[in-house]
Image (cartoon, rainbow, N blue to C red):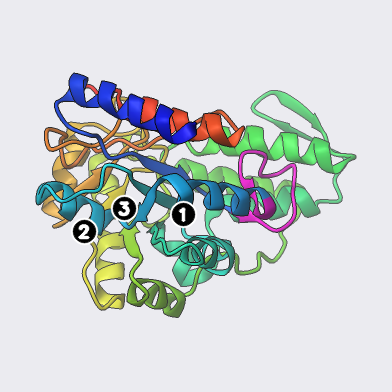
Amino acid sequence: MLSVVLKAVDVVNKMKLKSTPLPVLYFHRVLSTTTAFCPDDWHFDNFQLLINKLSKHFTLMSLEDAVQCLENNTLPSNALCLTFDDGYQDNYELAAPTIESVGGKASFFVSTQGTERGYLWNDELLEIVKCTKAKSLVFNGKHFTLDTEEQKANAYLFLVGQLKVLPNSTRDSHLLELQQTLGKVETSRCMMTASQLVDLQNRGHCIGAHTHTHSILAYQADDVAFNEIELSVIFLNNLLPKNVKCFAYPNGWFGRDFNEQHEEMLRQSGVAYGFATNDGGITLNSLKTRLPRFMPHRKELNQFCISIKKIAGEKLSD
């Protein structure tokens, strides 16, 4: 029955868009244990169920393979791309093997400072808040009680939301202040290593860039934004057997988190495809530096599959 519904949505999409759109989903982490600090990430058990379901109705392809097939008019009508942002080690240990177990490939967008030192600024913030002995915190006039893990998680989620929309220098200054207030702790490696990225590419997965420090480009001065793009691309090109062709904008909403100016920076860095987080599917008419990605909100697996097809039929505005 699900297959019939999916094919019906395909017919509607093709009538509307004159082609079958390529859906691209985005994930971040796949967790072996649940934590209040990462409420939106998938638990491994649920992720396994999802991949098993998707593999029955979709062909799971890397972005590079799928886009090439699209441009050659050889893309399967049930093609689907799964992408993972930031470069967390659980992507290598849990996500990639699960997708490979059903014959699929995926794509991994890496913030390269995490590869270099083992973690990003937000991971450092998480550990500071999680491990603090302080019982309270005041930040920008907002008071937090820090007695329980849930309270600490709520404080972290507020803080990361505040700091990520700041210029890098201001973000880092606030992070230093929070270290001084709550106590500095050692942050263990949680990001993929250089050798793991090489291994993933050699196994047929796509590796793409995602800025150097996981910086939202629209909140940065132009030179900082360009540096964030260029540093991540150069780092990966020097590391990997094949140069990167894909880039994902952090946060990724076109018109808010990046704009046409950042698309031009991407072209100057030699990257062919830029991925947003606006709804829609990819067609031959899509702007290559502003390709849509999305995540269905429906968690029931049949509805999740139907939502993939429906959302792919929407169009990211030019």
Start and end of the magenta stretch? Answer: 30-45
Q: Main secondary structure of the magenta part?
A: loop
Query: Is residue 31 rendered magenta in the image?
Result: yes
Secondary element under disc 1, as helix, strand or loop, is strand
Residue type highlighted by circle 1: Asp
Report how far apart the C-alphas of labels 3 and 2 lie in the structure: 16 Å
Q: Is residue 282 visible?
A: yes
Residue at image x 79%, y 31%?
144
Residue 77 position (above or below residue 61): above
Which circle marks residue 86 in the picture? 1
State which quadrant residue 318 falls in: top left
Secondary element under disc 3, as helix, strand or loop, is helix
Residue type highlighted by circle 3: Glu
**Left or right, residue 7 beside residue 298:** left
State which quadrant residue 259 falls in: top left
**Left or right, residue 10 beside residue 262:** right
Which circle marks residue 228 in the picture? 3
Residue that mark 2 sits on: 245
Q: Of marks 1 and 3, which one's residue comes earlier in the chain?
A: 1
Residue at image x 78%, y 40%?
152
Q: Residues within 10 Å of mark 2 (few under 14, many from 20)?
A: some
**Left or right, residue 250 beside residue 226:** right
Q: Of marks 1 and 2, which one's residue comes earlier in the chain?
A: 1
